[in-house]
Image: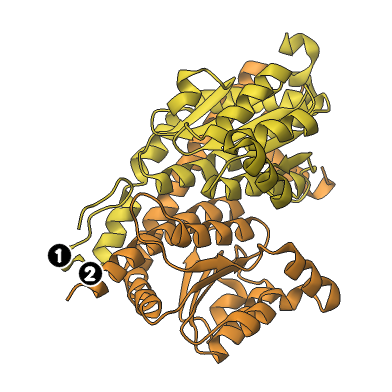
């Protein structure tokens, strides 16, 4: 552990610095920490439901119109957010439960494409180049970041915006650089300083977005 | 329109509105409270995992469908910590080698995809973490069964009532997200493995609680 992190760690887990090895006390602290984190995520979801529900329904209606026009959903993010992009894509493409499959894929899936772009040009073009090669004006670009500052997401949204795609961004903290972009049509910010709680809330945001979008697509099908 | 399991009825006319989103968010609260009620099981699982890491074990994570993305998320969480000062811990996801996964599935069937990899990539001192939203994924059941045979510590994240993982007692530590909506189950799993990661470090940073005498 770095010296700088110690005061924060000591405040969070004072028992670590009290000497001895009292296992029951440590287990009790870990239980309390679990309960506290559960309360944090429920509160964060409550805040997001209050601030973003109307815009989530509007984004879903626009996404449904894009699917009806032949568009596809293209999802991207780095690290843990890359796994969220993959979850979002497979949720649309292979939802199960009798839900209607919709075309979607994630831009971190193909290790040949990812390593070629990173090695030959740089990680900052990783998603923008793929959107330029694959994307059409009917498509939906969804980018996920916890910081909102990833350069390859900023470039991807600028590319998607230029091409007329519907653009949806998920960020954390106060939205970072993504909050300053005109190229994002719908930005959903999870206002937290915890990367973990941000990711958990973002998972709910895109699950709700999916559920509303599938319902909106079904609505478009009705005469 | 018939509402399928894991899908929820929308407002009048079927056109989604903000109130539908508010209601969907609200469905998450009770299952999270239930997770908080399992805090004791979380703490014991973290301690057992920390002991394996302390003794040189690695974490192997597996799941299919959406849970394959969770397996990869867990691996990156441990290998590349988001909190400065936390040490990297060894973890691999068994979902990323497409050649091997599809090769085993084609030759031996889906139930073998993780079992085979665990047999040849894992050691008895390792930790197997299987993720199955309904507790019935054949591939995860197969992986946990081989992990038991080899002596790995077995952790499982399931949903619903725990399915066959619970019924067959395939995990040393089973955490169940009590919802029948696979989306809500996944969200609870994300919280579970974030908490497991963070709190494993609490034990790991105090080796006194991992001493042989304490573990005996």
Chain identity of mark 2? B
The answer to whether the residues at label 1 and label 2 have Cβ atoms under 8 Å apart is yes
For this view, does A64 lie left or right of residue B116?
A: left
Residue B15, label in figure: 2
Residue at the image point whose x is 42% and y is 80% from the top: A70
Please tell me whether mark 1 sits on a helix, a strand or a loop.
helix
Q: Colour of chain B?
A: yellow
Q: Please, which residue is most extreme toward the front here?
A: B107
Chain identity of mark 1? B
Horizontal and vertical percent position of residue A66? 40, 79
Residue nearest the observer in this picture, A39 or A63: A63
The reply to whether label 1 and label 2 mark residues of one chain is yes
Residue nearest the observer in this picture, B120 or B47: B120
- Res B61 visible: yes
Horizontal and vertical percent position of residue A167? 49, 79
Horizontal and vertical percent position of residue A166? 46, 81
- Res A18 visible: no
Question: Does residue A165 sit above or below B184 in this rendering?
Answer: below
| Res. A205 image quadrant | bottom left
For this view, does B96 lie left or right of residue B193?
A: right
Split into 4 quadrants, where in the image is the C terminus of chain B? top right
**Whole-number angstrom distance, CA of label 1 to CA of label 2:** 7 Å
Split into 4 quadrants, where in the image is the N terminus of chain B? bottom left
Residue B12, label in figure: 1
Horizontal and vertical percent position of residue B16? 26, 67
For this view, does A147 lie left or right of residue A215?
A: right
Q: Say few, some or many: other residues with alpha carbon within 10 Å of mark 1 (under 14 / 14 to 19 / 20 or more).
A: few
Q: Colour of chain A?
A: orange
Please tell me whether mark 2 sits on a helix, a strand or a loop.
loop
- The scheme the figure's colours follow is by chain
Question: Does residue B92 sit above or below B49 in this rendering?
Answer: below
Residue at the image point whose x is 47% and y is 31% from the top: B135
């Amino acid at each position: 552990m770095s010296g700088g992190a110690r005061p924060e760690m000591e405040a969070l887990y004072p028992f670590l610095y009290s000497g001895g090895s009292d296992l029951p006390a440590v287990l009790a602290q870990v239980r309390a920490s679990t309960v506290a984190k559960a309360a944090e995520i429920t509160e964060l979801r409550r805040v997001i439901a209050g601030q973003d529900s109307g815009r989530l329904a509007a984004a879903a209606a626009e996404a449904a119109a894009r699917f009806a026009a032949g568009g596809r959903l293209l999802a991207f993010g780095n690290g843990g957010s890359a796994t969220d992009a993959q979850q979002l894509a497979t949720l649309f493409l292979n939802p199960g439960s009798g839900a209607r499959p919709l075309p979607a894929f994630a831009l971190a899936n193909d290790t040949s494409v990812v390593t070629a772009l990173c090695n030959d040009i740089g990680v900052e073009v990783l998603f923008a180049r793929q959107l330029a090669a694959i994307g059409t004006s009917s498509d939906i670009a969804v980018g996920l970041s916890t910081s909102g500052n990833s350069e390859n997401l900023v470039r991807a949204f600028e590319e998607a915006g230029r091409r007329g795609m519907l653009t949806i961004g998920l960020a954390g903290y106060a939205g970072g650089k993504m909050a300053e972009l005109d190229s994002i049509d719908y930005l959903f910010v999870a206002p937290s300083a915890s990367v973990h709680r941000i990711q958990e809330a973002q998972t709910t945001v895109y699950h709700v977005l999916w559920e509303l979008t599938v319902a909106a697509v079904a609505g478009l099908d009705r005469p | 329109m018939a509402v399928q399991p894991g899908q929820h009825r929308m407002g009048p006319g079927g056109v989604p509105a903000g109130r539908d989103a508010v209601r969907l968010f609200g469905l998450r609260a009770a299952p999270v409270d239930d997770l908080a009620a399992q805090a004791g099981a979380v703490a014991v699982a973290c301690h057992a995992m920390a002991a394996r890491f302390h003794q040189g074990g690695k974490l192997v994570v597996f799941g299919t469908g959406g849970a394959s993305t969770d397996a990869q998320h867990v691996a990156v969480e441990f290998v590349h910590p988001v909190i400065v000062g936390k040490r990297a811990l060894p973890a691999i996801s068994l979902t990323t080698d497409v050649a091997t996964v599809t090769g085993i599935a084609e030759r031996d069937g889906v139930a073998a995809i993780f079992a085979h990899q665990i047999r040849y990539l894992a050691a008895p001192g390792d930790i197997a973490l299987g993720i199955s939203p309904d507790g019935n994924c054949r591939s995860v059941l197969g992986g946990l069964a081989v992990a038991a045979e080899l002596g790995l510590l077995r952790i499982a994240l399931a949903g619903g009532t725990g399915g066959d993982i619970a019924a067959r007692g395939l995990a040393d530590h089973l955490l169940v997200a009590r919802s029948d909506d696979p989306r809500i189950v996944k969200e609870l799993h994300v919280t579970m493995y974030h908490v497991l990661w963070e709190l494993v470090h609490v034990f790991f940073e105090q080796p006194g609680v991992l001493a042989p005498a304490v573990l005996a």
